[in-house]
Amino acid sequence: MKIKKLLLLVFCSGIILYFFPTRLFSDDLGKANKYYEKYDYQYAIEIYERLLNENPKLEIAQKLANCYRFVNNTVAAEKAYATVLTFPGFEPINYLYYADALKQNAKFEQAKRNYLIYAERLPEKSDEAVKLANSCDAARLWLENPDRNILVTNEADFNSENSDFSPVAYKNGFLFVSDRQFLKPIKANSKKVYGWTGNPYLKLYQAQNTNDTLDGSLKLFLMPEQINDQYHSGSATLTKDENTIYFTKAGLVGGIEYGNTKDLVMKKAIYFSVKVNGVWSPAIPFPYNSPLNHSLQHPALSPDGKILYFSSDMPGTLGGMDIFYSENTGSGWSKPVNCGPTINTKQDEVFPYIRKDGKLYFSSRGHITIGGLDIFSSTGAKNTWTDPDNLKAPMNSSKDDFGVFYYQDNLTGFISSNRAGGKGSDDIYRFSEGPKELFFAVQGTVVEKQTGNPLEGLNIFLVNKKTGEQKSAISAADGSFKFDLSKEADYIVRGDLDKYFSKQQGEISTKGATESTVYNVKFEVEKGEEAFLVKLNNIYYDFDKFNIRKDAEPELLKVLDFMNSTPNVNVEMRSHTDARGKAIYNMKLSENRAQSAKKYLLDKGGDQKRLTAKGFGESQLLNKCADGVKCTDEEHQFNRRTEFKVVKVDPVISYVPNFFIYPNFPFKQS
């Protein structure tokens, strides 16, 4: 009998699915949309995923992608937004969301392309989009070149499979925020589960450890109900005596709590509690909370406890969440003031933290970041700050990095991150900065004084004044040279005193230097007219020809005489064309002309090893006769020429006509 009833139920269900599929689809979509509107994204995702497979539509694909973005699942968001872009009629903003997900997944080239597409589709957003595209290059550079003096490790024994973040020192341990399962399992869809994440509401925990470290021996306690209520309790800050705590709370706006509004929204507010005789007082609201209108969150006290910094989207924000401050006047807290545009951007600035030395740390999406939220630092106070510095890798990753805390030594502490390889959705990481490895170097260039052209093949010397150790370098094709320097040392940088340089020299000292420094120097060669670059003005060519004319031979013989009188120089034949004809053809023609000049000298007894030939096409015209400019035949012929240049001087040579080098002192740090 039971089997017959079961078969009948299956048969009836099949009939319903066959005759009323649209009705069932519509019901499920309506249910998912209600979850979406109530910010219960984790529940909405399950339905949207199924509906998208059954009946692909832009509306479903769009909301599914948004859900993954809201719950910060960047891997799923990347895939979902890629799907959105396959539907006709999608909004251009999806290129931005897709690029953001790609960047957080460290796919910088793809992210850059989609930021630029976004700029093309929405020209009014091009400035923002181009900035984001360019930031991908910085992100790759920072991620591929982490600071090797900083070690970042996951507190795997401490973190849960859920979200753990924002530790602050408290007693012999820490306070931190977590949505971990603490006491007993909680059923999905219960009032104790946050539908946005599908996890319990965030709570403040106390971690006790006699060693003041986060490890497996920690004992965990929920902070009392004066601080943890039925909804979220978030990041906290404490006064120096640890008897007053400021923390974030979030509750439902709507229904019973704040009056009947149409939507139920989680708004955040700041509360504080005072410990009297070892017992925390009931939570007291910060006077500038306005849960129906805006959020206040992430409080952070200055070391003296007189200034409270926090994040808010209250009136006066530059966009998104900004960092504000309020001062304790003795009779209460002053009206909040925006910390200013140096710190705040049109995007989110959150999780402020003031180190014991007064330095501000915060997380931002609006400054140039590696991926999502990056941690920045700045010095100053109130609304006067220096330009923020990105802490770069390994402190920051392509994901979200936030909730920093420093010990008294200002070298060790904790950060929070959802970077790859973590145990949960957000994890607490320990960091320690080793002694900084200082780097010193001197770099410079050798150039011709009259023209500024770089000179190759000249000797530069570095002498350690204490040890007498000497190093040498030859200037490269671009005239550059470089030496690494040691710490706590004095040096002389000079040219070849016996051959090419005057006796002027410069001194560099790294003694007492506390920052890595590259010292810059410039040597300028002052030469005679025939020393380095000589124009053979009579070596001209017929139009579209490269053979050596009779009237050019006397000039070429002068080159041969010069080489014979200065046997330790190498000569480069440099040939040029006028601008008529195609550039590619002219380049080949000039190369043929240079080779013709070289061959002529070789035939007259020139040294093969000391001669090179190079063509420059129409790239170095001597007059106005560029493409599209009308010129006479004589004017065009002026550009059809060959020059010779001394490109390398052997250091044993005892004669070079009339040139000297003058260092540009004093040295300047860069």
Image (tube, rainbow, N blue to C red):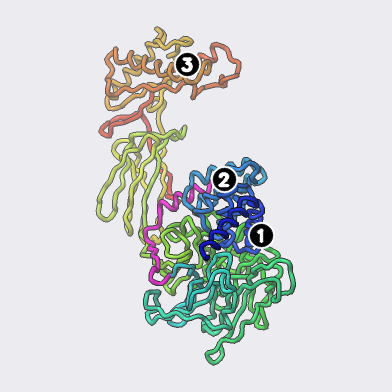
Residue depicted at x 55% and y 44% = 114
**Residue carrying label 2:** 115
Q: Secondary structure at mark 3?
A: loop
Determine crowd level at label 1: few under 14, some 14-19, many 20+ residues with C-alpha closer than 10 A: some
Amino acid carrying mark 2 in the image = Tyr
Report helix, strand or loop for mark 1: loop
* Residue situated in front as seen by the camera: 349 or 33: 33
Answer whether labels 2 and 1 touch (C-beta < 8 Å).
no
Of badges 2 and 3, the one in the foreground is 2
The mark lying in front, picked from 2 and 1, is 2
Q: Is residue 393 in sight in this rendering?
A: yes
Whether residue 387 is visible to the viewer of this picture, yes or no, is: no
Q: Amino acid at mark 1?
A: Leu
Residue matched to label 1: 318
The residue tagged with tag 2: helix, strand or loop? Answer: helix
Compute the Cα span from label 2 to label 3.
Answer: 47 Å
In the displayed structure, 584 sits above or below 457; it is: above
Q: Residue furthest front?
A: 1
46 horizontally vs 530: left or right:
right
Name the residue that disc number 3 marks: 640
The first of marks 3 and 1 along the sequence is 1
| Alpha-carbon span between mark 2 and mark 1 | 22 Å
Which residue is the extreme one toward the top? 550
Q: Which three-letter amino acid code belongs to the residue tagged 3?
A: Arg
- Residue span colored magenta: 130-159
